[in-house]
Image: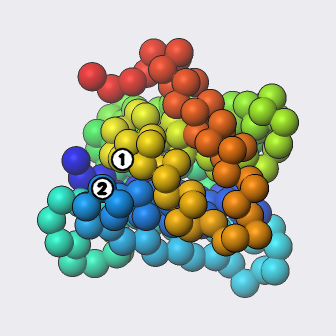
């Protein structure tokens, strides 16, 4: 299974963390992966994005022009990047922060996830990123959920290991949301 995914939102939403986690999980599954983070010059609240490529073959460059998949966390990211999704691609977006979704593109699959609301239901509004990643991993099958969960221990610093159970709950929540919504690709 190969995929290249672009994730975008604002700083503090944990976008760089889940990009790193996805790449780590791919490597744990003996796949090739690149992780390319980018963020604005602001100290807090600026733009944050990353690209992750997962492949069964060697990857020539971490740069992609038209991603197969996108995870969009806020309206600014939707407005700026949505049109770049490759035909036949997938866009998973946070419907709590994105209200205006371009309807002209009928060549891609769009999945709205109320990620903020689900994270709050879990008891921690900061789990939005893991909800989105759980939905993406389940929808695409790019990596196994168990591998993502194992990757948390590898990428989180020691001082944050106590947050692993909450992150696992959020990954499962996102996965369950797409299963219940009936949007899983056959």
Residue 51 shows in the view: yes
The relative height of residue 182 versus residue 118 in the rendered view (above or below) is: above
Display colour scheme: rainbow
Quadrant location of residue 54?
A: bottom left
The residue drawn where x is 63% and y is 66% is: 156
The residue drawn where x is 82% and y is 44% is: 125
CB contact under 8 Å: marks 2 and 1: yes
The residue drawn where x is 52% and y is 48% is: 149
Q: Secondary structure at mark 2?
A: loop
Q: Residues within 10 Å of mark 2 (few under 14, many from 20)?
A: few
Q: Is residue 43 left or right of residue 3?
A: right
Give the percent coordinates (x, y) of residue 3.
30, 53
Q: CA distance from mark 2 to mark 1?
A: 7 Å
Quadrant location of residue 176?
A: top right
Q: Is residue 67 left or right of residue 116?
A: left
Q: Nearer the viewer, residue 63 or 57?
A: 57
Q: Nearer the viewer, residue 58 or 183?
A: 58
The residue drawn where x is 62% and y is 56% is: 77
Give the percent coordinates (x, y) of residue 88.
28, 39
* Labelled disc at residue 130: none
Total marks shown come to 2
Give the percent coordinates (x, y) of residue 160.
74, 64
Of marks 2 and 1, which one's residue comes earlier in the chain?
2
Camera-nearest label, 2 or 1: 2
Residue at numbered disc 1: 143
Residue 82 shows in the view: no
**Quarter placement of the C terminus:** top left
Quadrant location of residue 162?
A: bottom right
Q: Residues within 10 Å of mark 1 (few under 14, many from 20)?
A: many
Give the percent coordinates (x, y) of residue 148.
47, 50
Q: Secondary structure at mark 1?
A: loop
Residue at numbered disc 2: 29
């Amino acid at each position: 299974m190969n995929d290249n995914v672009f994730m975008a939102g604002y700083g503090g939403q944990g976008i760089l963390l889940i990009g790193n986690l996805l790449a780590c999980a791919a490597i744990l599954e003996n796949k090739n992966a690149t992780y390319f983070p980018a963020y604005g010059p602001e100290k807090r609240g600026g733009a944050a994005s990353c690209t992750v490529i997962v492949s069964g073959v060697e990857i020539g460059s971490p740069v992609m022009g038209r991603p197969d998949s996108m995870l969009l966390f806020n309206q600014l990211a939707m407005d700026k990047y949505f049109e770049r999704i490759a035909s036949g691609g997938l866009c998973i977006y946070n419907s709590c922060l994105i209200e205006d979704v371009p309807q002209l593109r009928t060549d891609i699959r769009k999945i709205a996830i109320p990620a903020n609301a689900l994270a709050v239901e879990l008891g921690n509004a900061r789990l939005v990123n893991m909800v989105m990643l759980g939905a993406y991993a389940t929808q695409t099958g790019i990596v196994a959920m168990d591998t993502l969960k194992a990757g948390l221990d590898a990428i989180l610093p020691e001082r944050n290991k106590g947050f692993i159970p909450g992150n696992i709950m959020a990954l499962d929540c996102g996965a369950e949301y797409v299963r219940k919504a009936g949007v899983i690709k056959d």
